[in-house]
Image: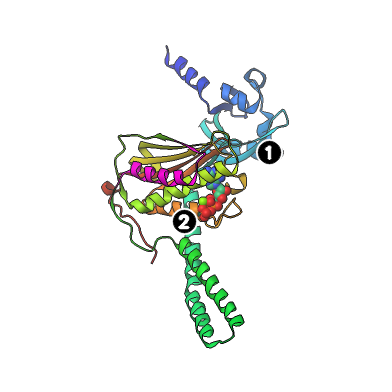
Amino acid sequence: MTDIGMYQRLLEHLTTAVVLLDGSLHVIWMNPSAEALLGISRARVEQSRIDCLEGDDGVISAMLAKALEEQHPYTQREACLVLASGESITVDYTATPLSEQELLLEFEARDRLMRISREEALIARQEMVKVLTRGLAHEVKNPLGGIRGAAQLLEREMDDENLSEFTRIIVGEADRLRDLVDRMLGPNKLLAHTPVNAHAVLERVRMLLTAETSNVTFIRDYDPSLPDIIGDESQLIQAVLNVARNAVQALEENDISSPTLTLKTRARRQFTLGAERHRLVCEIAIIDNGPGIPESLRESLFYPMISGRAEGSGLGLSISQSILHQHQGLIECDSLPGHTEFRLLVPLDIADKGHQLNGGHA
Ligand SMILES: Nc1ncnc2c1ncn2[C@@H]1O[C@H](COP(=O)(O)OP(=O)(O)OP(=O)(O)O)[C@@H](O)[C@H]1O
Ligand SMILES: [Mg+2]
């Protein structure tokens, strides 16, 4: 087969929608995925403009023209395209000028797959929220000791049993607030720094959850070649447990038929986390066939105090994320109804890179 024939076949079979435009934004070529996504046939639009790229306000076509003029690639996330059928879809697209007369467009549909990923901007936002909450938690904690002590002193001075009922409420509520703040602050000790077997962590979590549920089937899909993580075993158990317990809760609360939780491990080579490329990364995936993450939590899933459950405190995922950060790793999530996948990613080459684990908040 000639090279051209091979490239053509490759493009035609890509699941990514690809469109090639000329200098006046007329279609030169598009692959079948683009035809399917945009709901148009190549034969009909060749040599003409695609209506849905004009949009109501012409912003997309203006950006495309600008990318061509400046010969600079351009990416827009969550652009809304109104198709010829009247349906609107949300896409991420990248426009790459190949020459002054050729602009390559790649589209990724965003509607069905909700991805909360390892993008740098998102990580930076989570870090900022974490710093803010920690600061606030410290400020709340300081006066609590004083309030509690004063209430106890008052109680000792008072003979009236009816009044000491109130001081006991003050002490009880101060304790409740202190526990909440302690959970928000996370572990107040340095992380251990020992070899941890990811499968031992997962088996421990599976045992704990099996005791809490009788309906859910656990599937194990472990990569036996996975090297040990260097880190803190009890913290990693906590991180995995928070994620897996959410999955079990989602399965049980929604009455899913044959609820299944898959625990999977893989070694990933040459993997980028944030801005850093790692030689080897441990991936622990926790996959459930529940209803999926509510759309309203999409932006804020890993923030503290964000919960979709009436009795949830919304701290589980933010604690897990912060434990993973302390191991130079992170958690990402893809969610569709019927398939929610959280991936805990921990670099296995941090010793080579001379990184230290971060621990404690004091
Ligand atoms: N696997 C999942 N499927 C569906 N929704 C999920 C899943 N995991 C998390 N969620 C949603 O994300 C929310 C936040 O989870 P998080 O663990 O941070 O808090 P929580 O479970 O509400 O409270 P806590 O863990 O502190 O008791 C949950 O309330 C739930 O709505
Ligand atoms: Mg939770």
Give the quarter of the image for residue 165: bottom right
* 237 inside magenta stretch: no
Which image quadrant: the C terminus? Answer: bottom left
Picture coordinates of residue 26, whole percent (x, y): 63, 26
Say which amino acid is labelled 2: Glu
Q: In 3D space, how far apart are the residues under numbered discs 1 and 2 (Cα atoms)?
A: 36 Å
Residue 62 lies left or right of residue 234; in this view the side is right
In the image, residue 75 above or below residue 131: above
Residue 348 lies left or right of residue 146; in this view the side is left
Residues 256 and 92: in front is: 256
Element type at marker 1? loop
Give the quarter of the image for residue 285: top left
Number of numbered discs on residues: 2
Which image quadrant: the N terminus? Answer: top left
Picture coordinates of residue 176, whole percent (x, y): 52, 67
Q: Which residues are magenta?
A: 196-218
Pointer 1: residues within 10 angstroms few (<14), some, or many (20+)?
few
Q: Which residue is mark 2?
A: 127
Residue drawn at x 58%, y 27% as measured from the top left? 21
Element type at marker 2? helix
Give the quarter of the image for residue 227: top left
Residue drawn at x 42%, y 47% as measured from the top left? 208
- Foreground: disc 1 or disc 2: 2
Picture coordinates of residue 16, whole percent (x, y): 53, 28
Q: Which mark is residue 58?
A: 1
Residue drawn at x 53%, y 71% as measured from the top left? 172
